[in-house]
Image: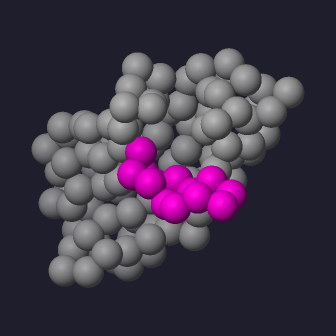
Amino acid sequence: VQLQASGGGLVQPGGSLRLSCKASGINFNIVNMSWYRQAPGKQRELVASITAGGSATYDDSVKGRFTISRDNRKRTAYLQMNSLKPEDTAVYYCNTFYRVGYWGRGTLVTVSS
């Protein structure tokens, strides 16, 4: 199983980014997908999850600003991030679980002016 995350970068406060996580080696249609993030000096935290059926949940800190989605034909999960704040700066990881947990390599998001 491989999860390849992309889409990070440097953005100004108030800007937007879309992260992508392409999965391979797993039946994407039946697994939940999640995005986590880890800021410098902090623990990794769950940002958003989407079930195989498309139901989404969010951490309170990103509700109304971030949207998680998935395209089963492309085997890809997305995280649309709007109204970004400096405190959103972190390495973002995609994750799935099928018997065991799998992590992508991570993509760095830096929100700074």
Q: Is residue 14 left or right of residue 22?
A: right
* Of 9 and 30, the residue lying toward us: 9
Q: Quadrant of the C terminus?
A: top right
Identify the residue at the far front of this view: 41
Q: Quadrant of the N terminus?
A: bottom left
Identify the image quadrant of residue 31: bottom left
Can the viewer see residue 21?
A: no
**Placement of 24 over or under 69, stated as above or below:** below
Q: Is residue 22 left or right of residue 73?
A: right
Q: Which residues are magenta?
A: 35-47
Q: Residue, x 56% and y 23% (percent of image)?
A: 82
Q: Residue, x 65% and y 28% (percent of image)?
A: 85
Q: Residue, x 67% and y 43% (percent of image)?
A: 89
* Of 76 and 49, the residue lying toward us: 49
Q: How many marks?
A: 0
Q: How far across and how far down the image is residue 75, in percent? A: 36, 56
Residue 41 magenta = yes
Residue 102 magenta = no
Q: How far across and how far down the image is residue 81, in percent? A: 54, 31
**Placement of 49 over or under 100, stated as above or below:** above
Identify the image quadrant of residue 71: top left
**Placement of 112 over or under 89, stated as above or below:** above
* Of 83 and 104, the residue lying toward us: 83
Can the viewer see residue 85?
A: yes
